[in-house]
Image: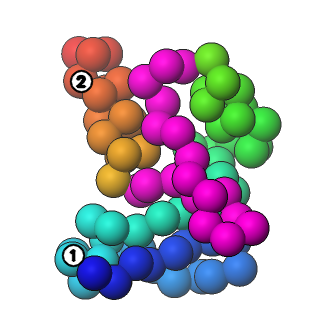
């Protein structure tokens, strides 16, 4: 299984990656903050206060989040809003 890691240093467009790698990609807190249009601090607050928010994983010395889990969390928020 190939693992794609996306972060601030990488300017890869996730939409241009093959779908099989998107399903297993890990992203940085900075990437999530950019997608949500917030600073990193509110993301860490979500991690500590929201039991449903995806938990990060350690990869070497880096902290990453599953993009699939983060997208599912956001989709859940949008679904509950309706």
Looking at the image, residue 41 lies above or below residue 29: above
Looking at the image, residue 78 lies above or below residue 21: above
Q: Position of residue 79 (x, y in %)?
A: 24, 24
Q: Position of residue 22 (x, y in %)?
A: 31, 71
> Which of 60 and 23 lies nearest the eye of the viewer?
60
According to the image, label 2 marks what residue? 79
Looking at the image, residue 4 lies above or below residue 69: below
Q: Are marks 1 and 2 in contact (CB under 8 Å)?
A: no
Q: Which numbered mark, 1 or 2, is in the foreground of this view?
A: 1
Q: Secondary structure at mark 2?
A: helix
According to the image, label 1 marks what residue? 19
Residue 55 on the magenta segment: yes
Give the crowd class for mark 2: few <14, some 14-19, many >=20 residues within 10 Å.
Answer: few
Q: Based on the displayed image, in which of its 4 quarters is residue 78 positioned?
A: top left
Q: Secondary structure at mark 1?
A: helix
Q: Position of residue 68 (x, y in %)?
A: 33, 53
Which residue is found at the position 74% from the left and 44% from the top? 40
> Which of 52 and 30 lies nearest the eye of the viewer?
52
Which residue is found at the position 62% from the left and 17% from the top? 49
Question: Looking at the image, is mark 1 or mark 2 earlier in the sequence?
Answer: 1
Which residue is found at the position 61% from the left and 31% from the top? 47
* Mark-to-mark CA distance, 1 and 2: 23 Å
């Amino acid at each position: 299984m190939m693992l794609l890691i996306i972060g601030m240093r990488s300017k890869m467009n996730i939409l241009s990656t093959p779908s099989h790698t998107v399903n297993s990609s890990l992203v940085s807190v900075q990437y999530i903050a950019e997608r949500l249009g917030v600073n990193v601090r509110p993301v860490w607050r979500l991690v500590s206060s929201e039991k449903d928010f995806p938990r990060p994983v350690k990869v070497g010395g880096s902290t990453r989040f599953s993009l699939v889990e983060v997208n599912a969390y956001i989709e859940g928020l949008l679904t509950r809003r309706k």
